Amino acid sequence: MGFLVVKRNRCHVMKRSKTLKQKDYDILAELVRDGRITYTELARKVGMSPAGVLKKVRSLEEEKIILGYTAILNHEKLSKKLKLLIFVKCSAGKHSIVARQIKKVAADSILEIHEITGDYDVVVKAVVKDRNEAKDLIAQVSSIPHVVSTSTSMVLDTVLERPSIAPS
């Protein structure tokens, strides 16, 4: 199940990286469709025993293939009516530092932060209550050291948004 690695005269047993089988993909696809599915129902859908499914799910979690489970919220019903994409230009080589600072500045409004290629270095996806909150968030991001400029787009309509895709 594992292999031996010798480093500086010390032995460590290293677990092999998991090779996914079709049943693993089937389980992942069902969990992406419904993260609240019971192990019994999941087992029925993928043609396994509940104990076998539980073992595979735990293995997928240990391998960090399944990173977690979460509720998907309707931000509009929680008074976060505006969705923004803030594109950030940074000083040369400072995009990682800026991205980490953005995370600290306004964590309660930010959904995603990505370091990107192209005309900008970082893109931030955020939800805010109103234009005043948007203005404040943009000002906070703009004031971070090494931020050269920002450009913000407001999302008018979301055609597709999902937290994950089923593996193929």
Image (tube, rainbow, N blue to C red):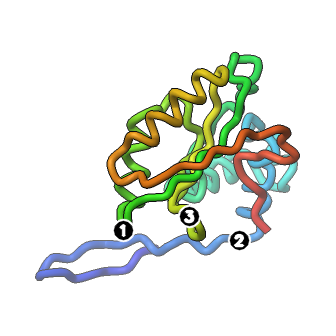
The reply to whether residue 58 is visible in this rendering is no
Q: Is 13 left, or right, of 18 in this rendering?
A: left
Residue 59 in the image: above or below residue 39: below
- Residue 155 falls in which quadrant of the image? top right
Frontmost of labels 2 and 3 is: 3
Which residue is farthest left?
9
In depth, the one of 89 and 164 nearer the eye is 89
Picture coordinates of residue 98 (x, y %)? 39, 52
Q: Are marks 2 and 1 in contact (CB under 8 Å)?
A: no
Which residue is at 37% across, 80% downward?
3
**Mark 2 nearby-residue class (10 Å; few <14, some 14–19, many ≥20):** few
In depth, the one of 50 and 145 nearer the eye is 145
Q: Are marks 2 and 3 in contact (CB under 8 Å)?
A: no
Instruction: State the mark number for residue 116.
Output: 3
In depth, the one of 5 and 83 nearer the eye is 83
Frontmost of labels 2 and 1 is: 1
Instruction: State the mark number for residue 93.
Output: 1
Q: Amino acid at mark 2?
A: Lys
- Residue 47 falls in which quadrant of the image? bottom right
In terms of sequence position, does the residue under pointer 2 or pointer 3 come before the other?
2
Q: Which residue is mark 2?
A: 21
Secondary structure at badge 1 equals loop
